[in-house]
Amino acid sequence: MEKKTVVTICLGSSCFSRKNRDVVSALQEYVRINSLDEKVHLQGGHCMGKCSKGPVIMVDEQIFTEITPAKAIAIIETFLLNRD
């Protein structure tokens, strides 16, 4: 079985106030529409130490800051392309 790309979305209060909910919704929809359940694992996480630059996500141990829904999707697409 192929290893999944793990996407951890910060659910801390600072990221929450910076609309991480929009990022969560966009990623869930992207995974669902593209049938990526076997390739992408979405999970919540706590503070990643970049509070002033939120929303923050971590993809396979690499941290990304100032995330918008579009940036999050582009990052996931890049990781998936590099896996194939």
Image (cartoon, grey):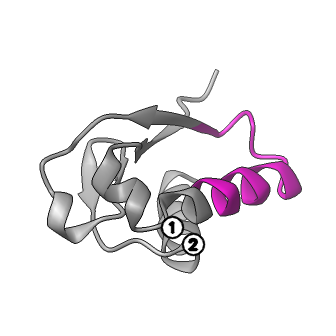
Q: Which residue is mark 2?
A: 69
Which residue is found at the position 57% from the left and 72% from the top?
A: 69
The amino acid type of the residue labelled 1 equals Ala
**Foreground pick, 1 / 26:** 26
Q: Quick one: label 1, few (<14), some, or many (20+) residues within 10 Å? A: many
**How far across and how far down the image is residue 56, in percent?**
33, 58
The amino acid type of the residue labelled 2 equals Pro
**How far across and how far down the image is residue 11, in percent?**
41, 43
**How far across and how far down the image is residue 9, in percent?**
44, 46
Which numbered circle lies on residue 29?
Answer: none
Is residue 25 magenta-colored?
Answer: yes
Answer whether labels 1 and 2 touch (C-beta < 8 Å).
yes
On screen, residue 59 versus residue 46, left or right, reads: right
Q: SS class of the residue under badge 1?
A: helix
**How far across and how far down the image is residue 64, in percent?**
29, 63
Q: Is residue 15 above or below residue 38?
A: below
Residue range in magenta is 24-41
Which numbered circle lies on residue 72?
Answer: 1
On screen, residue 62 versus residue 31, left or right, reads: left
